[in-house]
Image (cartoon, rainbow, N blue to C red):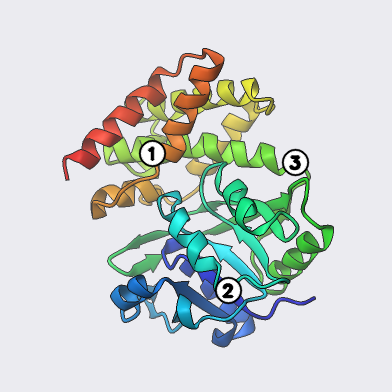
Amino acid sequence: MQINKVAFIGKGGVGLLYGSMIAQALGDDAVEYVMDDARFERHADDALTVNGEPCALKSVRASEATPADLVILTVKTTGLDQALKTMEHIVGPNTLIASLCNGITSEQKIAERFGWEHTVLGICQGMDAVFLNGELTFTNAGEIRFGAAAGTEPATVTTIDELYTRCGVAHTVESDIAHRMWAKLMLNDGINQTCMAYGGTYGSATEPGSEQRRCFVSAMRETLAVANAEGIELTEADLTQMVHLIEGIDPAGMPSMAQDRIARRKTEVEEFAGTICRLAAKHDIQVPQNDWLYRRIRDIEKSW
C-alpha cells in the first residue's frame, strides 16, 4: 500500500506545518483538513498563511468526507473526543492512523475506537512553530518520532515511514516509542507549562540562573521520577537532552501553551501536570512544582 491521500484532524500549527510539507511533495489534492460540520462553518473561510504565504489547503466537512489512506491527528487533547467522532467519517478498513497529540493517553483512546492494527504511537518535537491570528511561522520543522504498539501491524509502520521519507519529513522509527513519548511528556511538563505560567519564551525559560529555568528543570525532574515509578527508564541524560533541544531553537519562539495564554484558549494542563499529579499520588511521590503549575495555570484560565 502507498499513501496518496492524507487527512488531518486539526488545522493549527502542527497540522499546517506537516500538511504543507506533504502537500509540497504530493500536491495540494493529497492533503485535506476534516472538521465536524459546526467547526467547518466557523473556520472554513479563515485566511491562513504559512511563513507568509497563503495556505491553499482545503477543509472538508466531516459529513462529506471519504476515507483517507492516512489520518494524522494534530488536535489538542482537549478536543480529542470530538476528533474521534469526526474520524468515523474518514477511517475505512485500510486507513492508517497516526497521532501527534501531546501526552501519553491519546493513542489508547484512538485504539479503543478503531483498533491497534493500523495505529502507531508518536510524538513530534523540536519545531519552533508559532501559530497566532491565522499566521503560522517557523524556521525549524522539527521531527516526528513514531513506532509500533504491541498490536500494530508491522506494515503500518513501514508504510508511514515510506510516506514521511517521500515527503522529506524528518522522522525516526523508534524501537521503544513509550520511552520517547514519556520523554516528550517530560519536556512538555517543563517547557510548555513554565512558559504558560510565566508568559515566557524558549529563551527566557532557558536563561541560566533564572526562576523560569529552575521551574522548567524541576517540573521535568518530577516527571522523570514518576516515569521511573511507572516502569519507564527516563534518565538525567534524557532530561539534559531535552534542555539542549530547547536551547537550540529560536529563543523568541514559544510553545503552544504560551500561545494559548496570548489567545486565551483552554490549555492542555490536564494532560501535562494533571497526569503527573495523578500518577504521583498513586506512587506516593512528591511533585510540588507540577502541583504549583497546575494551580497557577488553572488560575490564569479562570481569569479569562
Q: Give yes or no for contact between labels 3 and 1 (Cβ–Cβ under 8 Å).
A: no
- Foreground mark, 2 or 3, reads 2
Q: Amino acid at mark 1?
A: Val
Q: Amino acid at mark 2?
A: Ile
Label 3 belongs to which residue? 176
Mark 2 lies on a secondary structure that is: loop
Tell me the distance, in whole angstroms, between the alpha carbons under discs 2 and 3.
Answer: 29 Å
Task: State the residue at coordinates (22%, 34%).
Answer: 299
Q: Which mark is residue 269?
A: 1
Residue 114 image offset from top left, x and y in percent? 64, 59
In the picture provided, is 161 more to the left or to the right than 210?
right
Mark 3 lies on a secondary structure that is: loop
Tell which of 68 and 63 is nearer to you. Answer: 63
Mark 1 lies on a secondary structure that is: loop
Tell which of 82 and 75 is nearer to you. Answer: 82
Q: Amino acid at mark 3?
A: Asp
Examine the rendering and report whether any part of residue 254 can be seen. no
Tell which of 95 and 29 is nearer to you. Answer: 95
In the picture provided, is 95 more to the left or to the right than 42?
right
In the picture provided, is 180 more to the left or to the right than 244?
right
Q: Give yes or no for contact between labels 2 and 3 (Cβ–Cβ under 8 Å).
A: no
Tell me the quarter of the picture where residue 216 sits: top left
> Relative to residue 119, is residue 254 depicted above or below?
above
Tell me the quarter of the picture where residue 172 sits: bottom right
Task: State the residue at coordinates (31%, 51%).
Answer: 260
Task: State the residue at coordinates (63%, 20%).
Answer: 229
Task: State the residue at coordinates (44%, 59%).
Answer: 82
Q: Earlier in the sequence, mark 3 or mark 1?
A: 3
